[in-house]
Image (cartoon, coloured by chain):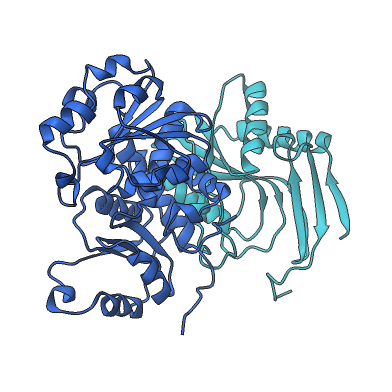
């Protein structure tokens, strides 16, 4: 299985810092970050660190588990493991930035929107992703994108974080998959 | 990751990994019950008949709430006011339910082994919600979760199960599960209520509860089952309460951090005094709360299986 290196830790840090700057420049007012489990959470922490350093304001970070909102529960082979959703801030009236590592079909984001809205009525929801690899199946676009990568359907983008994978790196893997029949 | 069993008929069938998965899932699902909107769409469109052929309040309500919090459709079936009371056999009732394509069948029955029989007749997973004097696996799992929340471990804990061991499906499931997970289980009660050969399960039998109270980290009191044979196994409720009831006097001998459990419903003043049932050591209501979480976890883990094995 061939691998292509896309981002090193230094590249990731630079890109995440740039996303933080964009968020501050947009003058959104009070916002909180909600990372989508699993790898949206360390990315949200990293983004929050840069936002706090640049704006000198602490930003709240939560974690959303979307497994209970999946629309393919009956199709998946084994049961997805449910993790806890932790939203340590008030959703009503707060601007929320959803954070995930890779934007692909958009189905994860749809599930996260449903999950978030069950907690209350946010002032707005924006989306920040480290990598946008295309192949959308739903009309969802990110507001803040670290890197856009043109991919083939059978390729996999693997974003790794120190806390989850022992290192910070982004790679592209070629992997046979029958997920997409269309080119 | 999924369970190694298709049905939950007995805690004997569960591996330690299964137990860990169920409890971890339950712990994570518990957060849903604290939300303003206590509902997620995980089991939307799933039909779950709750077949309670024996009176039940908390287990039945607990399963119904669990199903509804996951957006499934629970259907209540009882032995009263349905085709069973018109003479239909239980097997025919279940075959008819099966023809309606349920996703999980929850069954409580006064006869031991009935869920096992049903599991052979239906294509969907079956959950034993208590069968006769045999087992009550979901109660044992929620008890385990409750102990873990307080004690943070099971290995090496001394658990005293006191009362009608003979007629108690809760005791049987708890003995099997707690010993499997590494607890040291002691059973105590009138000699007439201790089943012969119970030592084979790795428990220590004690006839005087004063021996076991001081060493117990957990005391699990059992209900006197007046509807079964219990009442004929001791001379009077008053005498039972005196020798085998937990009260403020014998609680003086207990460890400072002991926790008191009871599967309910409580016969106040018989197996447990009101001041103990409502006292600072009691985690009886936590058991009820955790029951919903454990049942949500089981329905989630058993409903989401991909391909159903159709039996023809």
Q: Where is residue B107 in the image (x, y as percent from the top left)?
A: 31, 62
Q: Which residue lies furthest to the bottom in this view?
A: B312
Q: Position of residue A57 (x, y in %)?
A: 57, 21
Relative horizontal placement of residue B138, taking residue A82 as reference (left or right): left
Q: Is residue B26 visible?
A: no
Q: Nearer the viewer, residue A176 or A91?
A: A176
Q: Nearer the viewer, residue A136 or B240?
A: B240
Q: In this view, does A1 lie above or below A99?
A: below
Q: Is residue A151 above or below residue B34?
A: below
* Colour blue, chain: B
**Which image quarter holds the C terminus of chain A?**
bottom right
Quadrant assignment, res A177: bottom right
* Colour cyan, chain: A
Q: Is residue B256 above or below residue B302?
A: above
For the point 68% across and 63% down, the residue is: A135
Relative horizontal placement of residue B212, taking residue B239 as reference (left or right): right
Quadrant assignment, res B252: top left
Relative horizontal placement of residue B191, taking residue B304 as reference (left or right): left
Q: Is residue A167 visible?
A: yes
For the point 87% across and 55% down, the residue is: A3
**Which image quarter holds the N terminus of chain A?**
bottom right
All told, the count of numbered labels is: 0
Q: Where is residue B214 in the image (x, y as percent from the top left)?
A: 37, 19
Q: Which of A107 and B281 is in front in this view?
A: B281
Q: Is residue B162 above or below residue A148?
A: above
Q: Where is residue A104 in the image (x, y as percent from the top left)?
A: 66, 58
For the point 25% across and 36% down, the residue is: B190
Relative horizontal placement of residue A31, taking residue A151 as reference (left or right): left
């Amino acid at each position: 299985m061939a691998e292509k290196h896309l981002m090193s830790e230094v590249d990731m840090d630079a890109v995440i810092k740039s996303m933080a700057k964009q968020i501050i420049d947009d003058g959104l007012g009070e916002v909180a970050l909600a990372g989508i489990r699993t790898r949206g959470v360390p990315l949200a922490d990293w983004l929050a660190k840069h936002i706090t350093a640049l704006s000198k304001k602490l930003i709240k970070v939560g974690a959303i588990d979307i497994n209970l909102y999946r629309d393919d529960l009956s199709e998946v082979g084994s049961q997805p493991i449910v993790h806890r959703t932790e939203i340590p801030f008030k959703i009503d009236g707060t601007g929320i930035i959803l954070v995930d590592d890779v934007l692909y079909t958009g189905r994860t984001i749809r599930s996260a929107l449903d999950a978030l809205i069950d907690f209350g009525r946010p002032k707005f929801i924006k989306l920040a992703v480290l990598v946008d690899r295309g192949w959308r199946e739903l009309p969802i676009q990110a507001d803040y994108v670290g890197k856009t990568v043109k991919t083939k359907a059978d390729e996999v983008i693997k974003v790794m974080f120190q806390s989850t994978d022992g290192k910070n790196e982004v790679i592209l893997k070629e992997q046979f998959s029958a997920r997409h029949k269309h080119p | 990751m999924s369970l190694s069993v298709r049905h939950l008929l007995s805690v004997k069938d569960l591996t330690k990994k299964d137990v860990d998965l169920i409890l971890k899932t339950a712990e994570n699902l518990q957060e849903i019950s604290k939300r303003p909107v206590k509902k997620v769409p995980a089991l939307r469109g799933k039909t779950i008949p709750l077949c309670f052929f024996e009176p039940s309040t908390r287990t039945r309500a607990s399963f119904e709430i669990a199903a509804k919090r996951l957006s499934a459709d629970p259907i209540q079936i009882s032995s009263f006011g349905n085709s069973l009371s018109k003479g239909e056999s239980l097997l025919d009732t279940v075959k008819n339910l099966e023809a309606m394509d349920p996703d999980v069948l929850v069954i409580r029955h006064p006869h031991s082994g009935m869920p096992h029989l049903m599991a052979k007749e239906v294509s969907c997973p079956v959950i034993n919600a208590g069968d006769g004097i045999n087992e009550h696996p979901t109660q044992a799992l929620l008890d385990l979760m409750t102990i873990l929340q307080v004690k943070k471990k099971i290995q090496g804990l001394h658990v005293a199960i006191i009362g009608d061991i003979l007629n108690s499906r809760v005791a049987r499931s708890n003995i099997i599960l707690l010993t499997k997970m590494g607890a040291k289980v002691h059973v105590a009660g009138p000699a007439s209520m201790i089943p012969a050969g119970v030592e084979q399960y790795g428990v220590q039998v004690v006839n005087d509860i004063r021996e076991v109270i001081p060493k117990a980290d957990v005391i699990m009191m059992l209900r006197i089952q007046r509807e079964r044979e219990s009442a004929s196994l001791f001379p009077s409720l008053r005498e039972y309460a005196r020798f085998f009831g937990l009260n403020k006097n014998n609680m003086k001998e207990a460890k400072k951090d002991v926790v008191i459990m009871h599967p309910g419903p409580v016969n106040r003043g018989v197996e447990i005094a009101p001041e103990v049932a409502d006292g600072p050591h009691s985690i009886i209501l936590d058991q009820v709360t955790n029951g919903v979480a454990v049942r949500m976890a089981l329905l989630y883990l058993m409903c989401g299986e991909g391909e159903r094995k159709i039996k023809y």
